[in-house]
Amino acid sequence: MIKRLLAAWTCAALLTPHVHAVENIEFWTFSMKPKFTPYFNGVVARYEAQNPGVKIEWIDFPWDVIQTKLVTRIVAGTPPALVSLNVPWADEYARDGLLTPVDGLLGEARASYLPAALADLRFNGRTYGFPMYSNVAVIAFNTAIFRQAGLTRGPASLDEQLAFARQIAQKTGKAGLAPALSKIDGLFMQQGLAVMADNRAVFNSPRHVALVQKLADTYKVGGLLKESLFAEDNFPAVIDAYKGGRLGMLLAPPTAMQRIRSDAKDIYAITDVAPAPLGPTGIADGGWLVHFAIPKGVPARRLPAVGRFARFLTNDGNQLAFARQASVFPTTVKAASDPFFLSTPAHAGAAEKAVAAGALSMHHSRTLYVAGIDDYDELRRSLVKAVEAGVTGKQDVRQALDQAVAIWNRKLATLPRHGAPR
């Protein structure tokens, strides 16, 4: 996407005189207005009060517009000083030379951020952003269904999730689990199974086949919720099934507990929560980091001032305040260890337990994705179709994965630059 945008705007830029970046510090976010307008206005006011002569300008764009706006401004030579990005976007921009490394600007603040968050932002040995917030998944489970199935605790591994799901189906006739199989590539990576190696698809190994076969075995006995199982976004169907008492376990961000409490008080009352298993990689499920990056073209003389504001914007206090309002998790060590996240009061409900369970996993939160492949969504859809064929019994699992690998490798052979899992 970035290359197409660059091509479209470079010609126009050649006809436009270059101008120096504005002297004020302009920073961009996406999809924060109007809910978080008071928060960001407060951050700006505090910084300006503490730094006379510095003017901060905050601009918010819809998430599906911000990339086009950013490329336009970079090509025109007038980028914002800071821009909010997710990790896959940042990786692509960094690969195309459109971001400025921030290693020299982090200074002593580097130690304040969670190591996992900084690791998400390291591409080719350089750091490309100031972490702001992330999320993780937890497992909510219906204790009544668990008791009926003879289960007494949350699962401690993916194998246990699937075993529990089969047991729930066999004992209660209800589905036990509803994994987001449209994101099977992320599941493979979280379980330590490479999607690609040496610029070739490798997801047809015996270990990949074995994992998909376990999913198929669980599906066959009714352990997986069949509604929207392979949909791009299966969450609406999954949470509806859980709220309706038709699903034993829900893998979701902690905010889902608030919806259950609001919409299905009877189910909320019998819901308990456990951290989602980390898997053999030690990576938590559901990580998705958002951060502030410095675009290419910000004048070098302005970088120290931009770095100071970036460190303020993402410091302990500001991250903690934002995370509490947004129901996400901060990415500084101190804020992530705040009692708001780690302590659960006596008689705590599922919502409070979910926050504490998620906080325990934040040190293991990473953004999992495959980087640097043009039209990757097309390839991922072919993988999902193969997994669907194998899981539902329409095709032998090994045969389905072999065919998908062949599709990938034919496509990858035509690309000038191949990506790698992150």
Image (cartoon, grey):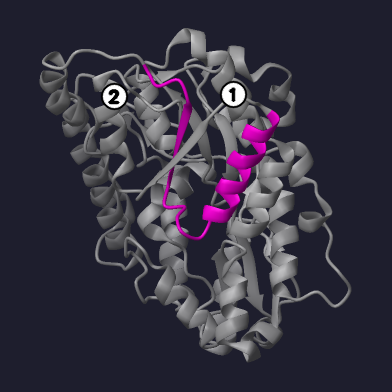
Most distant residue in the top direction: 301
The residue carrying pointer 2 sits among few (fewer than 14), some (14 to 19) or many (20 or more) residues within 10 Å by Cα, namely some
In reply to whether residue 44 is colored magenta, the answer given is: yes
Q: Residue at x 69, y 51 (%)?
A: 321
Q: Nearer the viewer, residue 133 or 359?
A: 133
Q: Quadrant of residue 413?
A: top left
Name the residue that disc number 1 marks.
Answer: 53
Answer with left or right where residue 347 lies relative to residue 308. Answer: right
Q: Residue at x 36, y 48 (%)?
A: 63
Q: Nearer the viewer, residue 333 or 251?
A: 333
- Numbered mark located on residue 142 in the image: none
The residue carrying pointer 1 sits among few (fewer than 14), some (14 to 19) or many (20 or more) residues within 10 Å by Cα, namely few
Q: Residue at x 26, y 45 (%)?
A: 377
Q: Disc 2 residue type?
A: His
Name the residue that disc number 2 marks.
Answer: 418
The x, y position of residue 343, in whole percent, is 84, 60
- The magenta-colored residue range is 21-50
Q: Secondary structure at mark 2?
A: loop
Q: Residue at x 68, y 16 (%)?
A: 107
Answer with left or right where residue 239 lies relative to residue 410. Answer: right
Where 17 falls versus 60 (above or below)? above
Q: CA distance from mark 2 to mark 1?
A: 46 Å
Q: Is residue 295 visible?
A: yes
Answer with left or right where residue 397 lies relative to residue 358. Answer: left
Q: Disc 1 residue type?
A: Gly
The x, y position of residue 409, in whole percent, is 22, 32
